[in-house]
Image: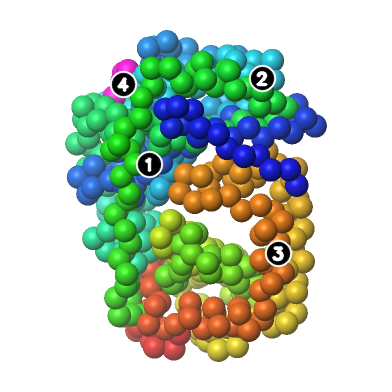
Amino acid sequence: MPQYPAYRLSNGLTVVVIDSPRHHQVLISLMVRVGSRFESPGENGASHFLEHMLFRGNSRFPDTDSLNRAFEDAGGLLQAHTGVEDTTFSFVVHPERLDHGLDCLSVFVREPTFPDLDKEREILLEELQYDYNEHGQLTNLAILGGQLMWPDHPLGQSVGGDPARVGLLTRESLRSHHARYYTPDAMVLSLAGPVRLDSVRPLVERHFGGGWVPSALSRTAPVPAPPGHGAGPLKKSVLDADNQFHLQLSYPAPGYNHPQELGVNFLMRTLDDGPTSRLQRVIREDAALVYHIGADYSGYWDTGVVDIATSVRAERLGPLLEHLAEVMREFRAQGPTPDEVERARLRYRYALEFSRDSLSDAVDRHAWPLLFSTVRTEEEELQQVQALTRDDLAGLAKSLFRREHLHLAVVGPLDPDSEALLNRALEIF
């Protein structure tokens, strides 16, 4: 696989050009080193609110309609996403409209004017309602799990923010957030498609170079994750008028800069990588207890978490907990089987090869890591996966899924009997 070394403008902007001549579109992505982890409790939700406000207008395109038309004229729709540690803007352009697309993106991120703030706030507050029930209680499992895992720490905050606090964010506070974090030295710009470095470089310099200065504040490291997660197991349950229980089991894990990160990622594949993998086969296919169950790993720069999430009818909560506890006890005690390891290894290699067909996957590999980490090539990743032994993975499973590390978040029709089942689950896991 070819390598795409990054270069930097004099103002600190990191640029990655991924030349893929067989494609007929150029994917432009701008990643900003800011998200909910960078926010104090009083400013929680500012990064997400700011992302929305950039779509409201800027010095060149004063309203949403003219702004969106400009990006559409380049060939695609501008998309955005705010996360825990980064905010990303991306869109597809026709190769012949590359100059226009870069021009639009530069003005978009550099010169917002923040019109219609209260109108956008109302839209945001509507979006946030998805996380709450009719009584105003938080029911989003991911947020509840984060609060349980990282209490009183920015990692435990909602990306969207608390509605009451979002209601208090001002135009001035958003301008300040933008001035602090939307600086070139805190960004990675990538272009992927039929683009040549020698032709792209002057365009990038013209639109993202002159007059845009770095800021020392933007490189401030986020608050480090706490070294421990408290004595567990821990449980957080929320009463909700539903006919199902929604559960998430969370365990602390290494971050993506840790030597064991790849091992954790691979281990989770042996647990859940389709209907024949252990978690889905035992709980869904054999026991027929749930419609969906999944396991996932989320890594941050200095910590991470593995989650197992599912939903079940109220009357089947007990059997689900018994089966799930048995699966996790066996997995912790013995790790994956030789067959599970080899199947996961094969599917991992296939997934790496399939990713070559995707421009977004190329950006994820060659550009996104430069916000907080270093690039790992496909060849390096495959070599590390091939070197993992079953003993390595068994040891990792034993250390990850310790009972005292369990954090259980539950939403559903709670009553004394179901609470008793959940409390017992903390003992049998």
Please give the residue where the numbered disc 4 appears in the rendered image: 114
Q: Find the distance from the CA under tag 2 to the CA under tag 3.
A: 34 Å
Question: Element at badge 1?
Answer: loop
Question: Element at badge 4?
Answer: loop
Q: Which of 290/187 is in front?
A: 187
Binning the other alpha carbons within 10 Å of mark 2 as few (below 14), some (14 to 19) or many (20 upward) gives: few
User: Does 116 appear in magenta?
Assistant: yes
Please give the residue where the numbered disc 3 appears in the rendered image: 383
Q: Which of 255/229 is in front?
A: 255
- The reply to whether residue 86 is visible in this rendering is yes
Q: Amino acid at mark 3?
A: Gln
- Location of residue 37 in the rendering, given as x and y in whole percent from the top left corner: 33, 50
Image: 371 above or below 417: above
Please give the residue where the numbered disc 2 appears in the rendered image: 199
- Check residue 34 in the rendering and tell me which mark sits there, or answer none: 1
Q: Which residue is drawn at the image coordinates 54% and 21% (left, top)? A: 204
Disc 2 + disc 4, Cβ < 8 Å: no
Q: Earlier in the sequence, mark 4 or mark 3?
A: 4
Q: Which residues are magenta?
A: 113-117
Question: Element at badge 2?
Answer: helix
Q: Which residue is drawn at the image coordinates 47% and 21% (left, top)? A: 208
Q: Earlier in the sequence, mark 3 or mark 1?
A: 1
- Location of residue 8 in the rendering, given as x and y in whole percent from the top left corner: 51, 32
Q: Earlier in the sequence, mark 2 or mark 3?
A: 2
Q: Find the distance from the CA under tag 1 to the CA under tag 4.
A: 19 Å
Binning the other alpha carbons within 10 Å of mark 4 as few (below 14), some (14 to 19) or many (20 upward) gives: many
Q: Quadrant of residue 92?
A: top right
Mark whose residue sits in front, 2 or 1: 2
Q: Which of 266/241 is in front?
A: 266
Q: Amino acid at mark 2?
A: Ser
